[in-house]
Image (cartoon, rainbow, N blue to C red):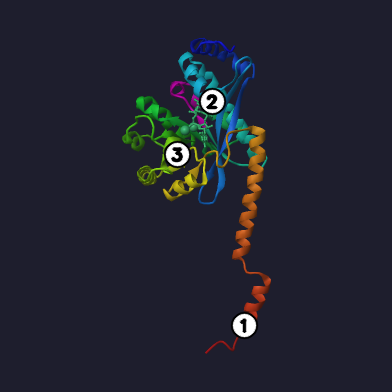
Amino acid sequence: MMNMTQSERSERIAADLPQAIVRAELELHFQPIVRLAERRVEAVEALLRWRHPALGPISPAELVPIAERTGAIVAIGRWVLREALRQASAWAQAGLALRVAVNLSARQLSDPELLPLLSRTLAQTRLAAGSVEIELTESLAADPRTASELLGGLRLLGARVALDDFGTGYSSLASVAHLPLDTLKVDRSFIADAARDRRVRAVLASIVAMAHELSLETVAEGVETAAQQTFVTAAGCDLAQGYLHSPPLPAAECERWLRQRREEEERRARRRSRARRPSSAQIARTAARAPTAGTSAR
Ligand code: C2E
Ligand code: MG
Ligand code: MG
């Protein structure tokens, strides 16, 4: 396997892809998305993983373009959608209610089964449509008609829509204004530069301001350091995703991570409410100082 050329490798991947689902070689990993104001985990993004029996792990960056070319992405994308919702529903039933974000490739926009599948799967998993967010890349702005039809359908079902990797590619700002979106995900390259370059921070802040003007929420992608998180918070980003919080994790590990995180969030919330609520000693002191009823009047 070691001395394969790049094109032999691509051919092998293309040939084996259709079997990956039936052989159960695909898996989803999940990466938490944190609301910056409360530092609360609000969502997870489902990210595709394929362990090829001979080639080992194959990244989606390599896999998705090949699957797009062969058309296998349609079947894979349907599997991803079902699996992501199934997992989110299992977590909701276990007391870990979260929104789940699912990536959609350009080719899936014209999959006539996509909306019916989403609608059926929502009914089967009893998930609220609003707890599903479909992530689309800027490349879909290349086909705005098909895109806005699909987006309209997603809207009708009640699912949320995010524009992924914003700030790369070549979509016009107009497409952001015209597509029915809920979320803008600011690309990682931007976040990395923001910590180094004051001008990039200024642009980041204006992207966030524009998004808010359009009633869109913003997610900073690829937040790796506390310094970057400080910058994206200052720029007004609503949510953050990146290695600082957690890398994408297999479902079982993600569940452990989420439980631990929820416990910390609850401890923090209890501490905050204790700090606000006066203690019984404070109440007694206040009562002792207060003038008794009747004497205070006049
Ligand atoms: P994406 O949707 O923008 O997903 C975020 C990518 O950034 C993930 O790469 C994630 O592992 C990585 N990442 C997250 N935080 C950090 C960080 O702090 N630093 C760095 N350096 N990277 C970070 P991944 O999982 O390799 O996925 C790559 C791309 O492949 C995704 O980018 C998405 O466009 C595509 N993809 C993944 N899963 C699917 C899928 O199920 N369907 C489709 N159509 N595309 C998918
Ligand atoms: Mg994404
Ligand atoms: Mg992205």
Whether residue 110 is visible? yes
Q: Residues within 10 Å of mark 3 (few under 14, many from 20)?
A: some
User: Is disc 2 placed on a helix, strand or loop?
Assistant: helix
Q: Which percent across, then down, holds residue 180?
A: 39, 36
Q: Which percent across, then down, holds residue 18?
A: 56, 14
Report the quarter where the N terminus lies.
top right
Q: Is residue 24 left or right of residue 223?
A: right
**Does the beta carbon of the residue at mark 1 sit less than 8 Å from ligand 1?**
no
Amino acid at dot 3: Ala
User: Is disc 3 placed on a helix, strand or loop?
Assistant: helix
The residue sitting at 66% across, 43% down in the picture is 259
Amino acid at dot 2: Leu
Label 1 – label 2 distance at C-alpha: 67 Å
Q: Which percent across, then down, holds residue 50?
A: 59, 22
Dot 1 or dot 3: first in sequence order is 3
Residue at image mark 3: 192
Residue at image mark 1: 289
